[in-house]
Image (cartoon, rainbow, N blue to C red):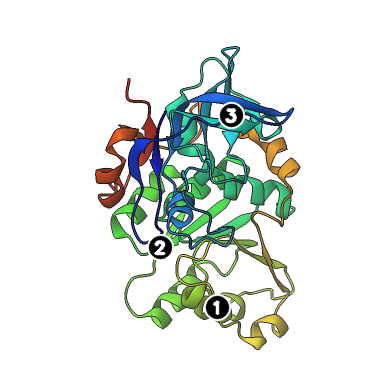
């Protein structure tokens, strides 16, 4: 079979022939891969920087996709915890980490949207008790996952969505996706943090895709401007685009009803993720979430890897024919 193969973490994947994997367990099956998304998480997997990396090489990247089982059924699957990912003509999946997709669903759309949508969907349904009409601040709303989070928060009942990010073009587009308030993080970091505090002091939940300096700086303004500091603010750490570490002011934990939790692999069980897949797939397939995928042949991975798609597009690799 053909696959995108990483043989060194210092360089991107190459399109080459690779031995077709063979299922070995009772719950395993060989699937024909129809679509696999190039997510930010995949890039971290391919350069060995993600916290789940095992440093095993050679590596076929790709953490999820849509595949066809031997009986013809189409499924969305999360790749197994091996070096055999979804960027290949075929891959071995664990059937327990897959769900059927409806006949009307577009495999490319599902592959584009599931991973960036999953973080906020699972967080708001599994990591926090979001009350009807909740108000949410999304830090890093101009990233792929952040853009999906804006839409998902509205879909799940948010009465107010406040979106903060650096990319001015994407920030402007977020009002069409459901953002009620947008806040620019460009320029001086402390001034940006103050703007966040002034715009989102009534938030109940923060979905944080940035962490690092933006998170640490925003906490005090966000909490001290609140009219009712006794009302709980739950800060949920999801991504770390701005840095793996953040300086958390001690006053933030004392001056208001404030809690910090995380959401990701480990804090939510695999069974918890799997239980959310059907409803999320139906929302995507039903046109309730906008993903704007662009399909590319897997054979083009070397040029696509070094030339990211436009700001509003999500790359999905598909078979050559």
Q: Nearer the viewer, residue 168 or 70?
A: 70
Instruction: Give the side of residue 67 with respect to residue 272, left or right.
Output: left
Q: Say whether residue 22 is visible.
A: yes
The percent coordinates of residue 243 (x first, y second) are: 48, 72
Q: Secondary structure at mark 1?
A: loop
Q: Are marks 2 and 3 in contact (CB under 8 Å)?
A: no
Residue 321, quarter of picture: top left
| Precedes in sequence: disc 1 or disc 2 | 2
Query: Mark 2 falls on what kind of element?
Result: strand
Where is mark 2, residue-wise?
165
Mark 2 or mark 3: name the one nearer the start of the chain: 3
Residue 24, position as x, y percentages in the image: 67, 31
CA–CA distance in space, label 3 to label 1: 43 Å
Q: Which residue is mark 3?
A: 22
In this picture, is 139 found above or below 250? above
Instruction: Count neighbours of disc 3 (C-alpha within 10 A) and say few if under 14, some if 14 to 19, many if 20 or more.
Output: few
CA gap, disc 2 to disc 3?
Answer: 44 Å
Q: Nearer the viewer, mark 1 or mark 2?
A: 1
Is residue 88 found left or right of 321 in the rendered image? right
| Residue bearing the label numbered 1 | 246
Q: Earlier in the sequence, mark 3 or mark 1?
A: 3
Image position of 261 with respect to 217: above or below: above
| Residue depicted at 36% across the width and 61% down the height | 10
- Residue 144, horizontal then vertical, whole percent: 43, 49
């Amino acid at each position: 079979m053909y696959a995108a193969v990483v043989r060194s973490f210092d360089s991107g994947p190459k399109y080459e022939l690779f031995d077709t994997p063979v299922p070995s367990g009772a719950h395993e099956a060989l699937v024909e891969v129809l679509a696999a998304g190039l997510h930010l998480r995949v890039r971290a997997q391919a350069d060995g920087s993600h916290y789940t990396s095992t440093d095993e090489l050679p590596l076929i990247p790709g953490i999820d996709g849509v595949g066809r089982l031997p009986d013809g059924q189409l499924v969305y699957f999360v790749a197994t915890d091996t070096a055999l990912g979804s960027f290949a003509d075929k891959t071995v999946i664990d059937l327990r980490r897959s769900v059927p997709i409806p006949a009307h669903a577009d495999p490319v759309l599902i592959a584009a949207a599931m991973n960036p949508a999953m973080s906020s969907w699972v967080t708001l349904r599994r990591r926090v008790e979001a009350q009807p009409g909740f108000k949410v601040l999304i830090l890093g709303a101009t990233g792929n996952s952040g853009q999906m989070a804006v839409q998902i928060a509205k879909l799940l009942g948010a009465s107010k969505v406040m979106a903060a990010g650096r990319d001015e073009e994407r920030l402007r587009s977020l009002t069409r996706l459901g953002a009620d308030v947008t806040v620019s993080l460009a320029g001086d970091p402390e001034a940006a943090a103050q703007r966040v505090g002034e715009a989102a002091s009534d938030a109940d939940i923060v979905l944080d895709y940035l962490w690092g300096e933006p998170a640490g700086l925003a906490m005090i303004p966000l909490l001290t401007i609140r009219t009712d500091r006794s009302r709980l603010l739950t800060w949920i750490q999801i991504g770390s685009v701005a840095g793996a570490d953040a300086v958390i002011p001690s006053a933030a934990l004392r001056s208001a009803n404030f809690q910090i939790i995380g959401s990701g692999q480990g804090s939510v069980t695999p069974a918890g993720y799997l239980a959310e897949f059907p409803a999320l797939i139906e929302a995507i397939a039903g046109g309730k979430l906008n993903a704007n995928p662009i399909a590319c042949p897997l054979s083009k991975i070397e040029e696509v890897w070094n030339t990211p798609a436009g700001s509003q597009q999500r790359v999905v690799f598909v078979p050559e024919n």
